[in-house]
Amino acid sequence: MMAMCSKKAYLKRRNGDNKYDVDTNIFQVKFDCLKENIVKIHQGDPIMCQQCETVLNKYSKIEDDVQNQQFGKQVWICEFCNTKNQIQIEKEEIPKNEDTIYLIQSAQEMQIQIENGDNSVVFCIDTSGSMSSTVEIKGKVNFKHGISAEEYEMLKQFIEPGDEHQIWPQFNTKHVTHVSRKQCVMAAIEQQIGELKKKNPNKIVGLVTFNNEVVVYGDGSEVPITIAGDRLFKQDEIENLLNGTAKQLMKHPIKEQAETLMKKFEKLQEKGQTALGPALISALQLAKVGKPGSMIIICTDGLANLGLGSLDNDANKQFYEDLGVFASQCGVVISVVTIKGEGCKVDILGSLSEKTNGTVTRVKPEDIEKDFANILKDELVGTQVQLFVNLHHALKFRGEDDPNIGNKLKREIGNATIATTQTFEYQVKNDQELQKEQIDIKDLKTVPFQIKVQYTNLHGDRLMRVVTQQVSTTENVQEAEEEAEVEVIHKRMAQKTAQIAKKGNYQEAQTYNTQWDGYVQRNANINNNQLNQQKNYNFQQHNLKLQTAVQRQEIRKDRLSQPLTNPQYQPQSNFPNFLKTDINLQQPPPPPIFQQQYCQMPLFNHSFGAKLPQQEQHQQQLIKELKQQEEKQVQIQELKQQEEKQVQIQELKQQEEKQVQLQELKQEEKQIQIQELKQEKNQSFSDDEDEEMADLFQFEQGKY
Ligand SMILES: [Zn+2]
């Protein structure tokens, strides 16, 4: 559950703190083990330190309270914060394992009754007009769901000679097939229904479709409910309408309903607008009558533009966040599958998945099938999950939003799936802090770590899982690095980079990523075994994707905010000349942040993107200076490395060669991307922007 990057905690003495330092002091927490059936619940309640709320554990030292002559009472000096706790505990209640499970409240006690049977899946499918757009797929593909004869008759009159293949499958040649987005989605759903029928025959599968209106089919056994007109704007009405009927609509398992449901799909016609918001409210009503772990898969190819949650403007962001929170409380996971082609504001829709720990993807129509399969595999293991992490009081967290967070933190996870991962960095407190707390790190041969996970399992029991590990320490960085599990570093750097970027701090995200990338790829201790080398090499592919996403978002942000970020170059207004002089005098120098951020960006090239000529000149000057600084820094770095690691020069050389090759490859790819960006600069870029946002969401969740 808790995995350390290194078996040794590196205690690096320091005067001050760097926000982003690089070393192997990282660990990750995964939640997949919450899925296991609980075999043994620990007898008795957890005993917590009155000061730091650490739970008494296998490493706690308990002594009889001789001093106070208290018969039957003991003293526990907390191994995390040194607080003396008077306790009373039976010997058999002292945990014997690192991993302990406590029952906080059983489902029975809370009078929660979760019916037997499976959880449900609700497909929430876009049938707006844009779903009829076709894509070319190489080779001949036989799609069962073409357009109906009725549809063909209707469309015939609009067909330009030569365009027949776009609408009528017979015109597809041996080399290329034209299929509509709707056909791809239907083929994928059919595939999944087939799989579910085989593997989870008791699962209840529901369908909701949306265009100008929302049609709630449920499991297909009842007459569907249509929501249209004014109702699309009234959340209460939709909820009330479905509240009474949802159970009826989601009653029959897929083993009975598969064929009926597929027939409903076949009749769907794509037309009109995109009432996604009201459809989502409806889908949630259906999913929440299922067991915790029920799932909604939204599949859309365009911008929600009708009814509640219309995304024509950003004001409706809150609507999706609120629905996400509500779904999470119900134990419903929402995944968003967006089809490439048109922009659909993934940054906003993504919050649904973020709040419920679902997945956000942007896929080609022909890849939807694979995507659905992956989403259905990522099952829920616990709801209302809260994670608490305690570090020894000589340590503190690094790289958290709150710089004063110290050695204790809590994260609200909400839903946890088997893929959910959280990562942490820590470091030893600085000299002044240690002195203040009278800690001598020489005395620290080991340091304990503890996580507490409070969660509700899928049966409705509230549990707490406590994992405590004891890790030996070292002041020798080599010792810590040689033991490193690079995958933990990869997870951390991907997650943190995406987190920083999603706040809009793209330059900071790039700096962070570059720093860590350099560390894992070039550090000789980490790379002294082939396995790590290989893993690092493989991760480069993922990281390149992440770097590209961040970089492109940065260019967009630059482009949008250019006149604002650089007041010096704002076009001069129509002020009379005498006033202009005054204004020029009053013009402030470029903001220090601007300069500073540029200086922190050694590896990224800022000379691309659409820029005004003066800006370009100025930036090129900056870049020139930067490059000189960079070269100097590289020289210093190399000298230092040579001094420190004479013995390993041979190894380093080999790695450097590899690195150069990789760097060249990267540069080449970057150049191509820059070219592409330049070409698209006059076009709408929301399609790619959505893709990059989807990437960021995935990296943040550790799903890459
Ligand atoms: Zn304590």
Image (spheres, rainbow, N blue to C red):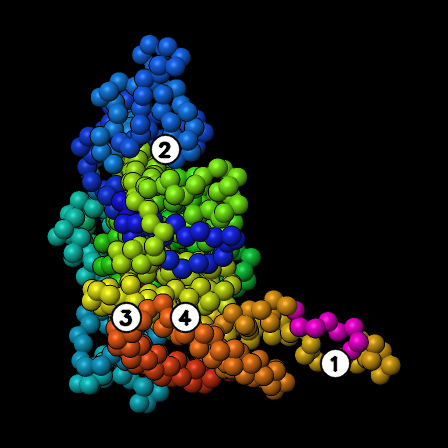
Label 2 vs 4, first from the N-terminus: 2
Residue 419 drawn above or below residue 172: above
Mark 2 or 4: the one toward you: 4
Task: Name the residue tied to disc 1.
Answer: 572
Labels 1 & 2 near each other (Cβ < 8 A): no
Q: Which quadrant of the rendered structure holds the N terminus? A: top left
- Label 2 secondary element: loop
Label annotation for residue 186: none
Query: Around disc 3, counting alpha carbons within 10 Å, would you say few (fewer than 14), some (14 to 19), or many (20 or more)?
Result: some
Q: Is residue 258 magenta?
A: no
The amino acid sitting under disc 4 is Lys
Q: Is mark 2 within 8 Å of ligand 1?
A: yes
State yes or no: Cβ of the residue under disc 4 lies below 8 Å from any atom of ligand 1: no
The one of 205 and 587 positioned closer to us in this rendering: 587
Image coordinates of residue 699 in percent, x first then y, are 36, 61
- The mark that comes first in sequence, 3 or 1, is 1
Residue under label 4, please give it: 640
Kindly indicate whether the residue at mark 4 contacts the one at mark 2 (C-beta within 8 angstroms): no
Q: Quadrant of the C terminus?
A: bottom left
Quadrant in the picture for residue 188: bottom left
Q: Quadrant of residue 363?
A: bottom left
Place of residue 194 in the rendered image (x, y in percent of width and height, measured from the top left) = 16, 57
In space, the residues marked 3 and 4 are separated at their CA atoms by: 13 Å
The residue to which callout 3 is attached is 648
Q: Which residues fall within the magenta stretch? A: 584-591
Q: Is residue 54 left or right of residue 107?
A: right
